[in-house]
Structures are given as C-alpha cells and as structure tokens.
Amino acid sequence: MRYVASFFILMSLFAPAAVFADPAIGVTSAWISEAPPMLKVHAGYLVIENHADDDVILLSASSNAYERIEFHFSDIIDGMASMKIQESITIPAGTRFEFSPGGYHLMLINNHNPLRAGDHVSVSLEFNRKITIDINMTVRKPGNYQQQQQHHHHKH
Ligand SMILES: [Cu+2]
C-alpha cells in the first residue's frame, strides 16, 4: 500500500498535469449532431470501451468550443420526452458504454462559434484515477450518420 502511494506521489511530481493516455480505455465513433445556428445546445455521441480489470468512471467533459458539457439520459416519462442529468458514467470492467441517439448523450451547451457538419471539436474526458483522454468529435448531419450506422441492419 505504501509502495502504491509513493508511486502516485512520484507520478504527480513528474507529470504535473497528470494527463496521460490510458491504453485500457478506448473511445470510438465520437460525433456531434449538427443543429440549426440558433440552437446553442448540441447532442454528442461516442462509444467508450473499458479494457481494464477495474471499473472506470467518467467524471466530467469539457471543451474550449463550449461553455460546459453535461451527461444526459433521454427518457419518456408519462408520454413526455425528458432528459435527466447524470453526475457521472460508470463503465464496468471489460464492457463498452454507448452514448447514442435516444439514450445517453453529451449535452454540449453554448458553443462559442458556429459549428457546421465537417467541423471538428476537441473534447477532454476526465475519468477517475486522474485519467484524461482528449478526443476529436466530428460534427455531422444526424440523418447521414444514422444511414451509415444502419448500413448493416437493412431490412428488405
Ligand atoms: Cu440532453
């Protein structure tokens, strides 16, 4: 235990920003749904894979392009669509977690500049154990993206 503690003290001395990529966590399919210019709240989606033997917890997300980012879950309550804020997202060991339309999403609030399909937004994901992963999210038209995703699931 003492050994582990001194390891983390050393890490914090030599890596002051405590930012390092963790090969145990993979992020794929990161995109933001293009919205009309007057709409300043955008939905973002991604898949997080946890290859580690421990659970990881996504604690927060931030971007220079937005005022702030929340984690939301879309649900239907009494026939009304609603969004619930999630304080954090736990990804159990050896599983993948999907933010996808109709379920969990990043709620990206108040973009500083207009964003259109084809633009890229860099987002920092902060996990427990001081893991930060910087990702690049692509702005896409929602219809196009869904067509691509459903390519293999066509019913004739
Ligand atoms: Cu939302």
Image (cartoon, grey):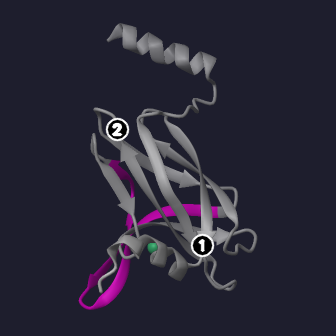
State the image quarter where residue 87 is shown. Answer: bottom left
Question: Mark 2 sits on what residue?
Answer: 51
Residue 68 badge: none
State the image quarter where residue 34 is shown. Answer: bottom right
Type of amino acid at the residue the image marks with label 1: Arg
24 on left or right of 43? left
136 on left or right of 93? right
> Residue at point 61% right, 81% down?
35
Q: Closest to the observer: 116 or 4?
A: 116
Query: Mark 1 or 2 closer to N-term?
Result: 2
User: From the viewer's perspective, is residue 94 above or below residue 62?
Assistant: above
Q: What element carries label 2?
A: loop
Q: Residues within 10 Å of mark 2 (few under 14, many from 20)?
A: some
Q: What element carries label 1?
A: strand
> Is residue 88 covered in magenta?
yes
Q: How far apart are marks 1 and 2 (CA)?
A: 28 Å
Q: State the residue lying farthest toward the right.
A: 113
The segment highlighted magenta reads 67-90
> Residue at point 52% right, 48% down?
125
Disc 2 Cβ-to-ligand 1 distance below 8 Å? no
Residue 140 badge: 1
Q: In which quarter of the image is the C terminus?
A: bottom left
> Residue at point 32% right, 48% down?
91
Q: In which quarter of the image is the N terminus?
A: top left
State the image quarter where residue 105 is shown. Answer: bottom left
Please state the horizontal and vertical placement of residue 90, each as a whole percent of the image.
32, 49
Q: State the residue lying farthest toward the bottom.
A: 79
Q: Main secondary structure of the magenta part?
A: strand
Please state the horizontal and vertical placement of residue 53, each as a whole percent of the image.
28, 32
Type of amino acid at the residue the image marks with label 2: His
